[in-house]
Image (cartoon, rainbow, N blue to C red):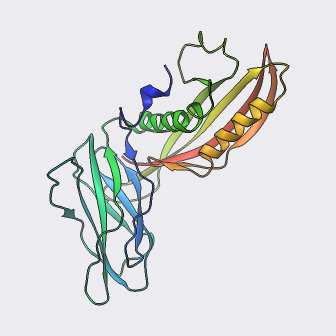
Amino acid sequence: MGHKSWDAVSIPSHGLLSTASISTLNICEAEITTVSATAVLLTITKVGSGVTKMKIGYRERKESDADALSFTATKNNPAVGQTFNITGLDSNKFYEFFPYSEDDMGDYDDPGPILLAYTSSIGWREATCNTIRSRFGIYVEDVVSGLLVQYDNEDTEDILDNTRWVRLAIKLGNSRQVSMGVNPRHRADGIMIASVFVPFSMGDQAAMQIADIIETAFRGAKANGVVFRTPTTETIGRISDSWQVNVSCPFYVDFIA
């Protein structure tokens, strides 16, 4: 079936679509931390010395006739780590978010770059798997010419005859609560295992090249609320008529219950 079925463009995945930080002329920055079906949580990551107040404007993203912005409550003397919890959003819609910061002269700057989020009614487990599969398809499967990928619970009939292929497995653990409040944040750990197979007796260079591409695509990356840690590569060796190398990448995902 391949990654096209999980493409975040054709089937939007739950969560953040852009991982760029919000910036203003007053050097006030924030990022989207978690997304649920009806809420988005933003966390302040940097506050300029001249900033005295900060708020977030947001609205549903439309192709034309943009709606007026709604605003969060204003934070006086904002600090790194403080959050804006925006609730009451409609599910399965794109939203855009604009930062506004006020300087010591009482003036609000123009908003910084737009952040986009897609609120989805699917569960966090499905959303997490969608995110990982989509990223793997874009940064690995589409990059390595002729590479076939077997995703969880897919048929192997066409893949096993291919000279180079990857079996992608996603393992999710249980979640735990990591914050308090009306909409508490939860976190779950997991691991992605990409098993790379090349024909036996052709050396390990081809397998290691694919492993390097996978490591680069996921090392320290952030996508749709999923935070990837440092991947590792392990040589398994000969398996039947193939040579196997495994790339494992731990990750965690935050979501609002």
User: How far across and down, in percent of the image, does residue 172 sit?
Assistant: 54, 36
Q: Nearer the viewer, residue 196 or 90?
A: 196
User: How far across and down, in percent of the image, does residue 5 sit?
Assistant: 43, 26
Residue located at (25% from left, 42% from top): 91
User: Is 32 situated above or below 248?
Assistant: below
User: How far across and down, in percent of the image, does residue 11 sit?
Assistant: 36, 32
Q: Outermost residue, bottom direction?
A: 105
Number of numbered tags placed on the structure image: 0
User: Is 76 situated above or below 98?
Assistant: below
User: How far across and down, in percent of the image, does residue 164 sit?
Assistant: 69, 22
Residue 183 horizontal side relative to residue 141, left or right: left
User: Is 1 situated above or below 57?
Assistant: above
Query: Residue 28, located in which quarter of the rendered image?
Result: bottom left
Q: Nearer the viewer, residue 201 or 57?
A: 201
Q: Nearer the viewer, residue 35 or 183?
A: 35
User: Is 92 situated above or below 109?
Assistant: above
Residue 98 horizontal side relative to residue 50, left or right: left
Residue located at (39% from left, 59% from top): 180
Q: Outermost residue, front direction?
A: 145
Residue located at (76% from left, 30% from top): 206
Residue located at (30% from left, 59% from top): 97
